[in-house]
Image: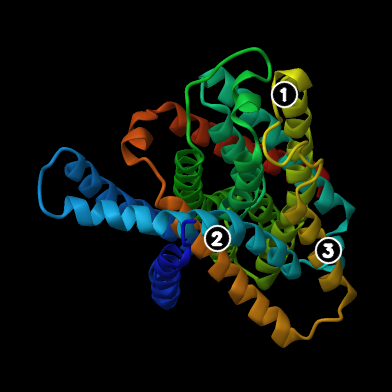
Amino acid sequence: MARPLPGLALTAAATAALLAAAPALARTAPSLSPLVLALLLGALAGSLLGAGSRRAVHGRGTAGPAAARVLAATRPGTDWAARHLLRAGVVLLGLQLAVGDVLGLGWRGLLVVAVTVATTFTATLALGRRLGVDRDTSLLVATGFSICGAAAISAMTGVVDRTPRAARAHADGTTEPEHDTATAVATALALVALCGTAAVVVLPWLAGVLGLTPEQAGLWIGASVQEVAQVVAAAGTVAGTAALATATVAKLARVVLLAPLVAAVGSARGRRAALAAPDPGAGPRPRGGRPAAVPGFVVGFLGAVLLRSLGVLPAGVLDVAAHVTTALFVAAMFALGLGVDVPRLVRTGRRPLVLGLCSALVVTGTSLVAVLALT
């Protein structure tokens, strides 16, 4: 049986280094998520080890055999971390959300958020099909742009990862090119980082040009910008504290919609997988049997939201939980990054980039129209 300890040790060391560098990163690049940096570092490490391993296969160089041994020794642990730490982070993410805070946005603000999320998600999926982008990448881009960037992509990765390949490739009778989950995640995270960073600069300027009030500007930024750090950076440049407060609550409202969205996608893909499953006489079902209608980590997320909303946890516990959540996501993204096929990522071409830019325009335009119409 493969031992996970070497891979877990590598993941823990990388996570500790990334968390130690996080304060400096926040000062120099506040809009860059530590999750994105973790995935990039993992992809770099995986590429270096993979290149060495390929040299070993072809009998070139002296570092190749060592790289191959490192890859083989760490793979069980990093695979475990990418799967299980990711889900644990999603569960703890629920402790950052209190239903009462979200309801304070008012029905108009909540409607702005709901319309923006629904429109962006469905439009991005439709655009992905038209552009010929594979389903996993389209789904992760749609989730990241409509909900909350890297954290939402991480949560939806749990659904993508648990879906049988046959359901992804043949659910509607069509086929698509083979596409691994790690590459899809890397593509979606890169697009979120690119477009979100641009929004930090552009949206506050546009809010001033359009003459929006601080509350309107905050609602627009909170309903459209991807990452929490990007929302804070953008809203913080708008005059008055009302913009930052409104933007933060609007962002939390989007995060609340993460659970029902992931549950709906998981349920739909589970039904498609069941329909695509072979007849009982054709052989055994895939391990795990019938897919669950709602992933367990989503149920845990909702339970954590309820626990936070009841107000039974002290502030110190919530602070620790927030740091642990970040650490779990960073560890999972580093482990996932080790599996990124960089040459394949480069070969994805410009279609995912076009999809990301179009999704950014949809989320920005829809939220602005909703803000102007409802507030």
In the image, which is nearer the foreground, mark 1 or mark 3? Answer: 1
Q: Position of residue 302 (x, y in %)?
A: 82, 59
**For the residue marked with disc 1, what is the amino acid?**
Ala
Give the x, y percent position of residue 297. Answer: 73, 55
Residue at horizontal 31%, vertical 53%?
Answer: 44
Q: Position of residue 157 (x, y in %)?
A: 60, 46
- In this orientation, which residue lies closer to the viewer: 241 or 54? 54
The residue beneath circle 3 is 303
- Nearest to the eye among marks 2 and 1: give it: 1
Task: Tell me, yes or no, whether the two marked residues, 1 and 3, touch with CB atoms within 8 Å.
Answer: no
Residue 168 shown left or right of residue 184 in the figure: right
Between 359 and 38, the one lying in front of the other is: 38
Q: For mark 2, what is the residue?
A: 234
Camera-nearest residue between 338 and 248: 338
Q: Residue at x 31, y 36 (%)?
A: 343
Height in image: 372 above or below 332? above
Task: Please state which amino acid type lies under the numbered disc 2.
Answer: Ala
Q: Which residue is mark 1?
A: 277
The residue at 50%/64% (across/down) is 331
Would you say residue 279 is visible in this rendering?
no
Q: Are marks 3 and 2 in contact (CB under 8 Å)?
A: no
- Residue for point 57% across, 18% down: 130
Relative placement, left or right, of 72 versus 284 is: left
